[in-house]
Structure formats: structure tokens, C-alpha cells
Image (cartoon, coloured by chain):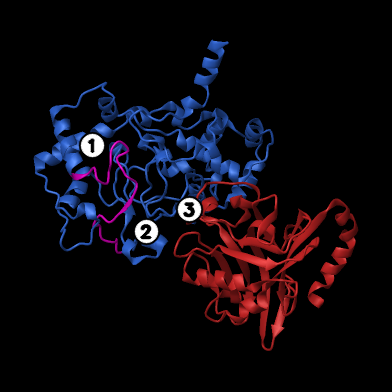
Amino acid sequence: MPLFRRSIIVFSLFAAPLSIHGQGVLEFIPSYQGRELLLDSTYHLGNDSMRFEQLRFYVSGIHFTKEGKTVYQFPKKHYLLDYSDQNSTRIPFDVPMYFDSLHFQLGIDSLTNVSGAFGEDLDPTNGMYWTWQSGYINFKLEGSCSESPARNNQFQFHIGGYQYPYNTLRSISLKASGRERQQVVLDLDRLFQEIELSSEYKVMSPNQAAVRLADLLQKSIVSSEKK
Amino acid sequence: MGVLCLLAFRSSDLILFQRPEHFPAPVYNFEHNQLNQAEVELGRYLFYDPLLSADGQISCASCHSPYNAFAHTDHDLSHGINDEIGSRNAPALFNLAWQSSFMWDGAINHLDMQALAPISHPKEMGEDIRNVVDKLNRERFYKELFYGIYKDSLATGERVLKALSQFQLTLVSADSKYDRVKLGMDTFSLQEENGYRLFLKNCNSCHAEPLFSNYQFKKNGLKADSVLKDYGRMMITQNSADSLVFKTPSLRNLSYTYPYMHDGRFKNLYEVLNHYTSLSVKETKLSEELKQKIVLTNHEKTDLVTFLLTLNDRNFVFNPLNKYPNKLRNKN
């Protein structure tokens, strides 16, 4: 429950005017130790400590469906969510009359990856584009953990790759009730259950490890709604 | 009215980029980045401006000089900031609109994104595109240029990269003796004609005319340098079949672009030809095209080189529109 306390406050602030204008908010919330993640805050787990310093990822092609038919497409094709800028993690939308599911892709599609320079969320100045080899970084998570043998106990996951066999774009479909507040949770507890940080602390190119992490991320993204 | 339309038509984008009659359709998608004079000029300033590097010493042109067909003659490996030396020979830049991948290993998939690699590489410009954009946004010279083009003076990564592409797209080399012969404006000498025949028989399957490369990745039998340990495309695809596979370069402008090969190991064209004629086709793993032994007498090698020299495009190399823009010298 504590995970959504802050969201509920936000909800009550926005609910009235939003419903009048038919505006909704889709929020992507990372959770760790069962609560909303705080960047630059140290978590303790027994003798181990864990700290997240950067979390950014692309969400593309967001749309709502009702019985399999698209009823609303979000205005921008790609959104860069950056947890050092809370505004970027709440995406407004016009609430459609009815919808039952939310769909999106985690990452950037291959066509966009091979089509040259783009601006705004896709601008390479955002630090989400590799320079030594073409391709967007779909998902970036950096921090430190006492288990990591790297310098300063760092861990760095830059997950990307758009070409077979290392395609890391993942499609996600979640149950969504037809309301103006939609929450998607990135369950980092679930993700880190599957990562052995003492040996797997650095993934920074399109490879088998990136593919495995993309699969794990796909499973770690859940709806806040009870099934 | 008719005359005005004609003038407008003739003075605009067509002059900036024109597909030579005997060339195939370009692969670059101009719809996503339509050329215009002001942006080409901006790209030219950026190309020659050492502001792009961390210490303000190295520009794109440091390793891609216009007088060397935008290669780095006499240097086997490229040089960067703090006298760092890279691991590959700087490739010549021309006819880039016909290329769908860049770098010797094809690491870069689009001309727009190419500049990010040298800008960021610690042994080249050692900079970050974010800093480049910040520096540009502090210079009045560039703010005015950006405002003139975009009606907004802000430099962005997208604008910088696309402007660099625009300038580089105008670097079309298609005015060599070979081109004039193809267009019926000149004739080969007997020796050149014989060299052309030998070229078509032995080289054209990879260095396909009229671009003189199919821009594909091939294994040409070069052994890895023991210091550089460069395995080429394998480092990108992580596929062992791509070990020692490199992109086929164009043979245009060879006189201006020596030394040759991805690490500049051959100083002249005879060394290159001797490599191909001495390949042990049974012992070395090679691309399909090289599995047939290439046999050339010394006379034939001379004829072949004579033909290859008809691919030099002096008008391209000395085109004043491509060289250092003098306004850049006085920008501050």
C-alpha cells in the first residue's frame, strides 16, 4: 500500500479538473522493497546496500484498446522517461470512453533505429544513444551495490540492440480499467531477484545478456491494478 | 512567370545534390533531411570547426582533409586529441549518399549518426555531443546561423547531426576521367582500356562500378595486426564468421587517399595488388569473390593501376565549395 500513497495525493489534486477536461495521466512507477523507488537513496538488505542513481527508459507506441480494438493512441510515438525529471514519468492523455487494456513497447523500434537523427525525446544529446555503434539505449539503470566487484561498487545496465539476434525491444500489454489515472509499475524487486550482481553488474552493448535483461524487464512491468 | 519558376527550380536544392547520370539511386533518405544552402553551409562550418573536440584542436577535417578526398594521406592510423593515435585508417569521404553503413566495420547505420562516433571517441575528439551543443549555444556566430535556418537560435543534437550530413551529402565525386569516358566525353588510352578489362575481370565483383564499391563486408585475407588486434566486423556482430571482415572501400581518388586498407598497412597500389595476387586461396578463409586465384603479370598490374588512376577526381578534390570556409577563421 505505501507504494501508492503519494500517487493518491496527486490523484486527488488533479482528479477534479482532469475529469472535466477528459484528461488522464499515465504514470510509470518504479518500485523497490515494495515502495516507490527513490533515486540516490541507500537501501539496506542485511549486510548489503543498494543505491540507484539513474533510471531512464523509452516507452513507445502507447495505446489503449477495448476488446482488442485501438480506442486511443498517445500523441507522441516515443517517450523518454527519466526519473531525475518526475514530469517525464507522468504522461497525459485524453481519456477514451471505454478501454480495457494498455499496450506499449519498452524501447525504440528497429525502423526508428535505422532512420537517422531525430529531435526531442530521441535527440542523441539525451545520452540514450550509443556512439561507438548505432542504436538507442532502450533502458538505462545505474547505481551501486555492495555486491558489485566493479570500481565504486557500480552496476550499469544499458539495455539496447535492435537487430537479430540481439533485439531488446519488448511489447507489454496490461489490464487497464477505464479510468483517468493509470499506473504501470516497474517491479525492481522482481528484476533483481534474477540478477546476481556479484557477477552480472555491467551490460552495455547488444548481446545475449542484454536480451536476457530485456526479457526480465518485460516480466517486471506490471499493472498496479489487481488482476 | 515561367522564367521565374525555372530560376527558382534551378537555383535551389538540385544544385546541392545531383545524382550523376551513370549512378544508381542514392540510399540516403533526403525526405527526412531536405538539403538547403544554409544548412549545407552550417554543416561545412561544423565540419571544419575544432570546437567539436574536447580540447578545441581537432576538427572532422583534421583526419578528413578536402585535399585528400577527405581522407588522411600519409597517416596509416587516425590522430586525435592529445596526440592520441587511433586504430584505423581514416576513410575518404565522398558519395556518402550511396552508403548504408559507415566505418570499416559498419558500426554506424546512418550518415546522420556517424559524427557521434568520432566526436565521442577518446582517441579522436574525446567530446560529448551534449557539450558540443552547449558550446554552439554560447557562440553568437552559430546562434545567428541556427536562427537563420530554423527561426530559433537553439542548437540541438538533431540539427547539428543533420547539418553535418547535409554538407557531407554534397561531397559527390563523379568527375574523373572514368566518368567522362562513361558519359562519352573522353576516351581511355589503350593501356587504360586494358586495365579496365582486367578490373572488370578481377575486381569489379566487390569494387563494383560506378561507385567502385558495393559497400559490403568482405574477408580479403589480411591477417590481424599483432598490436591492433582488430577483428573488424566481428566486434560489432559478435559473430565469429565476421572475424577479419571489413567494408569494401571505393577505389575512387586512390592517388589522394594512400595508405590503403583499414589499418593503412599498404603504402602504394602495387603492394595492394601483390596482396591479392599472392593470396593463398586454399589456406586462407576468404570471401567467395576471392576464392578464384587472381593472376596478373607485371605488365597487367601496370595497366590495371593506369586504369585505377582514371578514377582520380581532381575537380572534386580541389572544389572550392568543399574546402575550409574562411568565415570560420573570423567567427569570434
Whether residue B104 is visible, yes or no, is yes
Identify the hue of chain A.
red
Pick the quarter of the image with the N terminus of chain A.
Answer: bottom right
Q: Nearer the viewer, residue B63 or B200?
A: B200
- The crowding category of the residue bearing disc 3, from other C-alpha atoms within 10 Å (few below 14, some 14 to 19, many at least 20), is some
- Distance from Cα at disc 2 to Cα at disc 3: 28 Å
The residue under label 2 is: B233
The residue under label 1 is: B308
What residue span does the magenta drawing correspond to?
A: B202-227
Q: For the residue labelled by badge 3, is the local secondary structure a helix, a strand or a loop? A: helix
| Outermost front residue | A67
Magenta stretch, overall SS: loop
Amino acid, disc 2: Arg
**Residue B263 percent across, percent down from the top left:** 32, 53
Q: On the picture, is B58 further left or further right than B145? A: left
The residue under label 3 is: B82
Q: On the picture, is A6 further left or further right than B96? A: right
Amino acid, disc 1: Leu
- The crowding category of the residue bearing disc 1, from other C-alpha atoms within 10 Å (few below 14, some 14 to 19, many at least 20), is many
Q: On the picture, is B128 further left or further right than B151? A: left
Q: Nearer the viewer, residue B262 or B170?
A: B170
Q: Nearer the viewer, residue B210 or A158?
A: B210
Chain that is coloured blue in the picture: B
- Chain name for mark 2: B
Amino acid, disc 3: Asn
